[in-house]
Image: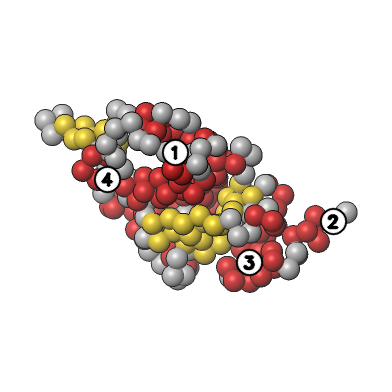
Amino acid sequence: MMRPDEVQPRARNFYNEEDYFSLNVRNGILRSPTGTRMLALPEEMIQGFHAGLEDETGAAAPVILYQCGRWWGRQWARRHGAEIRQFYATDAGELPLAFYLQVLRRVWALCGWGSIEISFDLRNEGFIECSLQHGFYSEIVGNIGRTTDDLVAGVLSAILSDISGRDLECIEIACRSKGDLRCHFLAGIKPRVSVVREWVKQGRSRAHIIEAIAQGDIRLREAP
């Protein structure tokens, strides 16, 4: 892995809004620095998509959104890796983790997905926590009394799996759509996330869930 002072871009810093997107006005095509076509969606379309999906699929809507997010996240991680190789002449896994997370936060914001922070404070308990402010999905859906960012959870599961080299699941434990100040997600291996999912269904708050994890409640659940 490279040291932070060894990371040198091959070209200008295209992680700013002016350089990251290129727009062909005549053809109405928006592209990333590596030539990937981008899509800009109006809020009304996302609102309609959410309402239509719930109307057509009912209780299956969160699962569908999550699986779509997983697929989308895998494709995004692949394209993001290509961008990093083009810009820094190295693979993402060779960058210092703190540096890589800075890049990830910037690209996440450029894509209009909000402001994200990734914490490894719970790594000894087997979790990665992500907090999201101004997340595009729940902010648009509004306060409906429950979590709604299943699509984002799926995206994060794929991205964090790519970073960690392990197959991770992800669940939202706090959400703007149920009145929380920020959206929070926990990623970990499937058995542990399944326990957290039960706690979310029971209506536990993020603070109660984090406290239970810190106290080793999940380890007790996993014990034979």
**Residues at discs 4 and 3 in contact (Cβ within 8 Å):** no
The mark that comes first in sequence, 1 or 2, is 1
Q: What element carries label 3?
A: helix
As drawn, the residue found furthest toward the right would be: 224
As drawn, the residue found furthest toward the front would be: 5
Q: Is mark 1 on a helix, strand or loop?
A: helix
Q: Residue placed at 31% from the left, 43% from the top? A: 15
C-alpha separation, residue under disc 1 versus residue under disc 4: 21 Å
Q: Which mark, by number, is residue 6?
A: 1
| Residue type indicated by callout 1 | Glu
As drawn, the residue found furthest toward the left would be: 26
Q: What element carries label 4?
A: loop
Residue under numbered circle 4: 16
| Residue type indicated by callout 4 | Asn
Residue under numbered circle 2: 223
**Residues at discs 4 and 2 in contact (Cβ within 8 Å):** no
Q: Nearer the viewer, residue 4 or 52?
A: 4
Q: Which of marks 1 and 4 is in front?
A: 1
The mark that comes first in sequence, 1 or 3, is 1
| Residue type indicated by callout 3 | Ile
Q: Nearer the viewer, mark 1 or mark 3?
A: 1
Q: Which mark, by number, is residue 210?
A: 3
Q: Position of residue 44 (x, y in %)?
A: 28, 52
Q: Nearer the viewer, residue 99 or 25?
A: 99
Horizontally, residue 123 falls left or right of residue 131, namely right
Q: Which of marks 4 and 3 is in front?
A: 4
Task: Identify whether 172 is placed above or below 34.
Answer: below
Q: Position of residue 205 (x, y in %)?
A: 58, 70
The mark that comes first in sequence, 4 or 3, is 4
Mark 1 nearby-residue class (10 Å; few <14, some 14–19, many ≥20) = few
